[in-house]
Amino acid sequence: MFNLPPELDRFFTVWKALPRTAHSLLPCKNEITPAALGDLLHSTGIAKMVAPFNLQVTYAGSGYEKSASTQVTGSNYYDLLPPAFHKPMALFHNNLLGTPCGAFVADVITTTSGSQYLHETIQLPMADPQGDPVYLVAYAHGRRPYGDTGERKPGNHNASSVRDMFYLDLGAGAPGDYIKNFRLCAPAGRQPV
């Protein structure tokens, strides 16, 4: 059994309390407001899947970008990844939006100044006004060393930097594969995909 870190669980609690107006399991993206999120908004990122391999980051708060050591607002998320990581990331995003389900990801960031730290996110799907799950909202918590102003090292955002990843069942099920301590695992009796 996996338990979210308390820093992320608070965001998950707020997300679960948002109204469901266009989708039975998901809130709409327009429910993400300063009034709804309060002090959580600065560590939140929002992206829209507009086409395969095209996840447009429409908003990333200053806390989110500081935690990620990368400026992402206005970017296609896939442009920030090494090409070899595109297909695994697309499978991950297809699981989140297609199931729909959420995920916890803990990834080790290495900065250009040589620091390493753990960057944790909870990633949750959200619907558009027609009820289609095309948005992802992420809340980040990082333990970046004080005074480190380096950017994320080029090429560091890849499969080998993911320490832990667990899918979260939001009511429609979730894939059973997970990553624990840099190792891809599957439920008992099955090989990971």
Image (cartoon, helix red, strand yellow):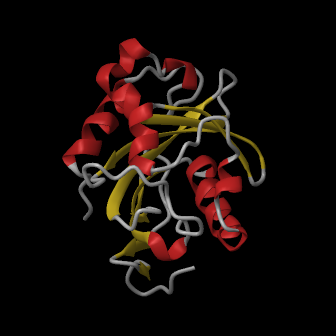
Q: Quadrant of residue 133?
A: top right
Question: Relative to the observer, which residue lies in front, 124 or 144?
Answer: 144
Vertical placement of 25 versus 92: above or below? above
Horizontal relation, residue 98 to residue 107: left or right:
right
Q: Residue at x 67, y 33 (%)?
A: 132
Query: Where is residue 86 drawn, in percent x and y?
Result: 69, 65
Marker count (numbered): 0
Which image quarter holds the N terminus? bottom left
Query: Where is residue 179 drawn, in percent x and y?
Result: 41, 73
Horizontal relation, residue 145 to residue 92: left or right:
left
Query: Where is residue 120 drawn, in percent x and y?
Result: 35, 54
| Residue at the limit of the structure toward the left, as seen here | 6
| Residue at the limit of the structure toward the right, as seen here | 51
Question: Relative to the observer, which residue lies in front, 46 or 66?
Answer: 66
Q: Residue at x 61, y 47 (%)?
A: 97
Q: Quadrant of residue 90?
A: bottom right
Question: Relative to the observer, which residue lies in front, 101 or 31?
Answer: 31
Vertical placement of 14 versus 9: above or below? above
Q: Residue at x 55, y 47 (%)?
A: 100
Question: Relative to the observer, which residue lies in front, 129 or 37?
Answer: 37
Q: Looking at the image, can residue 144 be seen? A: yes
Q: Looking at the image, can residue 177 be seen? A: no
Which image quarter holds the C terminus? bottom right
Query: Where is residue 10 drawn, in percent x and y?
Result: 25, 36
Vertical placement of 163 versus 26: above or below? below
Q: Residue at x 49, y 77 (%)?
A: 160
